[in-house]
Every structure is written in C-alpha cells, then in structure tokens.
C-alpha cells in the first residue's frame, strides 16, 4: 500500500511540475482521480502542453538541458522545474497569503481543518488565561509586499500582506498619530509577558523589560531602557516619549579669568578723619569675592567655581561685592574651600554682601536699599547682607572695634555717607584694626628646633621694600610638614614696625590667593631705618 500523501500547502495554486513533488504531496487533481476510481470512471491525468515542430504534434516532453556537443538538447533531469523566473516570483508573492490562511502548521492538520476557527480558539484561550499568559506575536517583515522569501521559518516568524494578523488601515493610522497621543501601539497589562521575535518583553508597572542583549546591556535606569522589540510592539514614538530623559541643562561657559576692579580700603587715621555719620560694619576675615551674575571672582580676576546650589539664589542682573566667609579665625580653611570647584564643603561658606558695583554712580545709601530689597524678596540661603550701623562718635567706633575683636573678628570698616563706588583704593572706605596685616613673598624655609627639628621652623620672607624677616608663629603642624612653596605670597599679622623697619611679632595668617606680590602697610608713625 503506497504511503499516504500530505496535502500541498499551495493546493490549486501550486506551480511545481516536478514528478517527485507530485508523488510526495496531494493536489486537487489527485482527489479527482481517487474519486473517479471509486466511481468506476477512468479519468486521464492532465497532459503537459504539446510543442509543435514542423507542424506535427510531438509527444509530451519533459524539461531538457542543452549541452555543448552538437548543440542538441539532452534530457538530464526529468523532475527539473522549468517555469519562467518571472512567473515563479509572482506566484511566490501570492502564496504568502495562502500559507497563512491555511494555518501555520497546516501540514500536520486534516485536509478540511478551518484556520479561522483555530485562530479564534487561540484568542479565546488567551483572553481566559489573563495577564500571566505569555503571548507570541510576530514582527512585520521589513520588505513587506516586496518580500520574495518562501521559507517556512521566515513565513512563520514575520507578518506579510494578506496574513490574518497583518495591520489594518486603522492600525496604520493609529501608528501615525501615536506620538501625538503618547499611547502605545499595543496595550500591555501590568505583569503581562509577550514573545516578540526571539525575545520576551514584560511590563512591570511603568517599566517595560526585554530579554534581548540590547536591553540588558544598557547602563542607565530600567525605566529609561528600550530596544527594537519594545519599539516594534509598543511603537517607536511612544518609546521615545517614555524613555526620554529630562534634558540636562548645559553648563554655561565660565571664563577662568576676567578683568576685575573693586573698591579698596585705606587705613583709618583718627587724626585726619571724623567718623561721625559714617557707616560701620565688621571687617571679615575671609576671601574677597566679586559676583558678576554668573560666577565669583577674586580681586585679581581669578574664578571661584561655586556649586550651582550655592549660587542659584544670587541675582543674574546685578553685580555684588562681598566676602566668602567661613567663620572667624578660619581664614586658611576658607581659602582651601573656595579654591576647590563645586566642593560639598561650600556648605560651610556664606557670601557676605556689602555693596553693588553695578550701581557705582548711586550713593551708598541707595545701593544698600537695593541690597535690602533684593534680600527681602529672594531670601538667598547662602548669602548674608552685612549689617551697617551709623557712627555717632569716635567713642562709638572704638566700642564697635572692641566688640568685633571680642568676637574673634579682625576689626571694623568705615564707609563715607553718600559716597560713590570707586574702583580703586579710596579714602571713602577705611579699615580700623588694633594690629596690621601685610603681604610678603616666601624666599626660603628655616629648619626647626627641638620637637620641630625635622620640619619647617619658620618661613623666610621678603617685604615689598626688600627687607627680609622670619615668621614662625601661626604655622600649624600640617603647615610645618608641608610649608608654603617658595614664591608664594602670604599674609602676616604684626603689631608695629621695629626701628629697623621689620614687622614686630609677625604671625602667619595664610597663603594669599588674591595677591600677585608683597604689599607693605604704611603707618603714620613708621620709623625710619637705622
């Protein structure tokens, strides 16, 4: 008994004439032949088209292959398919729809099976199973109606025109507008998993996961990850909208150096200045800083890059003059912090504002009113408005000086009433202290004695006038182990000059980052050199 044939999936559309194919698969004419035999009626098999040669009828011929010898045709393979290439390509394109209408596994089904019923039963099972069911979907073939492949693997894996799950016109229109509505092309329930191509996608709340390497290897947060499978199933516009991170604000270019000119103070001389009516404020032991609306700059124009959270409340349309202050007696630590860009230690610093250079032509009282108005409105977290007190007498100045020194401050500042902001050293701004500060350049390191014999004992320095002296007091153990480099400008504090012009009892204050050379203090009673 001959083996039972399997129904050809192309059925009446089959274009193959191979005898081996006809023996292996069942075609419509085979059913007619079987029916005729059962009824006792003999039917002839379909004949191949006859060719006319010289007007005579020739016997049905099988495909032949031409050989070179003699130019005569020779039949080498009777099963060879000789259908023209154009017709084959056209027929192959048409068979995609048939292959899907017959079902994906039609070869294993009975001849009379109905694909539509099978599809309906599968959809019904998926609906009853709920979100935990893993659905399998196919991707759209990128060649669509121009695809020429007929392989079963390709046909089962990708959607082509005419397939039962091919997108409709409504789906295509939805795909065009989904970017505007920000809705997915295909909805997914929370916890639902779907097989797309060779990967599996799953929804967990607002996160869409995929098992493909492209999704797994992404380093950013899961909520911002995507891949080709998610874009194909949910829609590219939806995915772009869902995974679009908030754009990082591009940092504005900050020049590391600009030209700066600020108001500088002279020394207060009680013999030549009557302070009554002047404005008194505490002299802060910090780093002078000019705010240009974008960044802090030193007196020399060098940038101090503060964190954004430190400067976010400062005005962008007004220049400020003030002091970056880390506390009384903490000058050295303040210098270390402000030299470090965007350091968390900036939380220990406050910006004490005392003037508005951008209103230089206005009297001081008007400039101070503008500052008060700004601080009342903005209430900046890391900025402080310096308090100004009107002087009533010379004794009042002395009292304020003692008060500041008692709190650990340096002294007081005096500002002339109704004065303009002059970008130079001006007599309209005076400083009053019980000791004097000056700058010197380090020219050497002296070896210590006793317990300090293995570290620096003192700094050898040179004054602006050229006189040399040593300063050892005020250096910490860390500074003795790693003293300021030769050539560095330091600030030192002293009480008075000796008869030879050297500072008396000098004390190291710190490295001066806003000075480019040594600077001496001119005292009214400065003695002459011996």
Image (cartoon, rainbow, N blue to C red):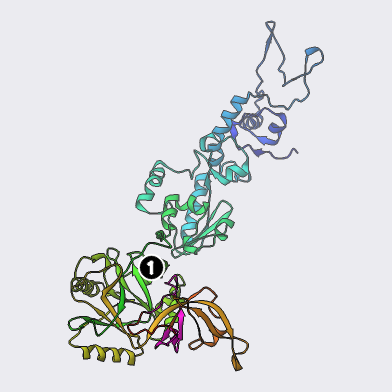
Q: Quadrant of the C terminus?
A: bottom left
Residue at the image position 53 percent from the left and 34 percent from the top: 146
Q: Residue furthest right?
A: 69
Residue at the image position 62 percent from the left and 42 percent from the top: 152
Q: Residue furthest front?
A: 530
In the image, is residue 502 part of the stretch drawn in magenta?
A: yes
Where's residue 170, x and y in %?
A: 38, 44
Q: Quadrant of the N terminus?
A: top right
Instruction: Say whether residue 327 is visible.
Output: no
Where's residue 175, x and y in %?
A: 41, 46
Question: Relative to 178, is 17 on the left or the right?
Answer: right
Q: Quadrant of residue 83?
A: top right
- Structural crowding at the residue carrying mark 1, measured as other residues with C-alpha within 10 Å and reported as few (<14), some (14–19) or many (≥20): many
- Residue nearer the viewer, 243 or 285: 285
- Residue nearer the viewer, 283 or 109: 283
Q: Is residue 17 above or below residue 385?
A: above
Question: Relative to 175, is 30 on the left or the right?
Answer: right
Instruction: Say whether residue 351 is visible.
Output: yes
The prevailing secondary structure element of the residues shown in magenta is loop
Where's residue 80, x and y in %?
A: 72, 27
Which residue does the numbered mark 1 point to in the structure image?
Answer: 297
Where's residue 475, x and y in %?
A: 50, 86
Q: Which residues are magenta?
A: 493-521
Q: Is residue 27 above or below residue 510?
A: above
- Residue nearer the viewer, 221 or 442: 442
In the image, is residue 3 part of the stretch drawn in magenta?
A: no
Question: Relative to 291, is 336 on the left or the right?
Answer: right
Q: Quadrant of residue 375?
A: bottom left
Count of numbered marks: 1
Q: Secondary structure at mark 1?
A: strand
- Residue nearer the viewer, 511 or 496: 496
């Amino acid at each position: 008994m001959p083996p039972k044939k399997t129904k050809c999936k192309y059925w009446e559309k089959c274009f193959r004439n191979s005898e081996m194919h006809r023996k292996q698969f069942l075609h419509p004419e085979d059913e007619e032949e079987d029916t005729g035999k059962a009824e006792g009626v003999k039917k002839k098999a379909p004949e191949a088209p006859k060719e006319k040669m010289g007007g005579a009828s020739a016997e049905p011929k099988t495909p032949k292959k031409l050989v070179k010898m003699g130019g005569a045709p020779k039949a080498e393979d009777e099963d060879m398919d000789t259908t023209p290439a154009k017709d084959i390509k056209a027929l192959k394109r048409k068979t995609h729809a048939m292959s899907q209408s017959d079902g994906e596994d039609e070869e294993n089904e009975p001849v009379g099976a109905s694909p539509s019923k099978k599809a309906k039963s599968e959809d019904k099972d998926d609906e009853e199973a709920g979100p935990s069911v893993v659905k399998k979907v196919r991707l759209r073939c990128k060649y669509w109606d121009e695809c020429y492949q007929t392989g079963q693997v390709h046909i089962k894996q990708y959607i082509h025109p005419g397939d039962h799950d091919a997108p409709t016109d409504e789906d295509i229109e939805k795909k065009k507008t989904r970017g505007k509505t920000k809705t997915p092309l295909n909805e997914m329930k929370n916890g639902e998993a779907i097989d797309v191509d060779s990967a599996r996608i799953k929804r967990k709340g607002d996160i869409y996961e995929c098992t493909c390497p492209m999704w797994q290897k992404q380093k950013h947060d899961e909520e911002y990850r995507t891949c080709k499978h998610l874009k194909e199933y949910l829609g590219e516009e939806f995915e772009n909208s869902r995974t679009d991170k908030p754009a990082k604000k591009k940092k504005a270019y900050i020049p590391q150096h600009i030209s700066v000119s600020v108001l500088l103070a002279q020394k207060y001389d009680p013999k030549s200045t009557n302070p009554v009516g002047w404005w008194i404020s505490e002299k802060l032991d910090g780093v002078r800083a000019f705010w240009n609306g974008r960044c802090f700059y030193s007196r020399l124009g060098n940038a101090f890059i503060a964190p954004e959270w430190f400067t976010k409340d400062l005005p962008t349309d007004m220049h400020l003059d003030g002091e970056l202050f880390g506390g009384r007696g903490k000058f050295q630590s303040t210098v270390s912090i402000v030299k470090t860009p965007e350091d968390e230690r900036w939380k220990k610093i406050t910006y004490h504002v005392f003037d508005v250079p951008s209103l230089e032509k206005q009297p001081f009282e008007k400039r101070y009113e503008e500052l008060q108005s700004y601080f009342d409105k903005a209430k900046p977290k890391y900025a402080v408005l310096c308090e100004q007190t009107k002087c009533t007498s010379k004794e009042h100045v002395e009292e304020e000086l003692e008060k500041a020194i008692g709190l650990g401050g340096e002294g007081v500042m005096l500002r002339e009433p109704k004065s303009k902001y002059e970008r130079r050293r001006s007599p309209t701004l005076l400083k009053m202290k019980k000791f004097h500060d000056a700058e010197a350049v380090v020219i050497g390191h002296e070896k210590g004695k006793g317990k300090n014999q293995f570290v620096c004992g003192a700094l050898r320095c040179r004054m602006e006038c050229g006189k040399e002296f040593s300063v050892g007091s005020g250096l910490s153990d860390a500074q003795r182990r790693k003293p300021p480099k030769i050539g560095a400008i330091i600030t030192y504090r002293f009480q008075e000059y000796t008869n030879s012009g050297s500072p008396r009892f000098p004390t190291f204050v710190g490295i001066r980052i806003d000075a480019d050379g040594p600077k001496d203090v001119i005292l009214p009673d400065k003695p002459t050199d011996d």
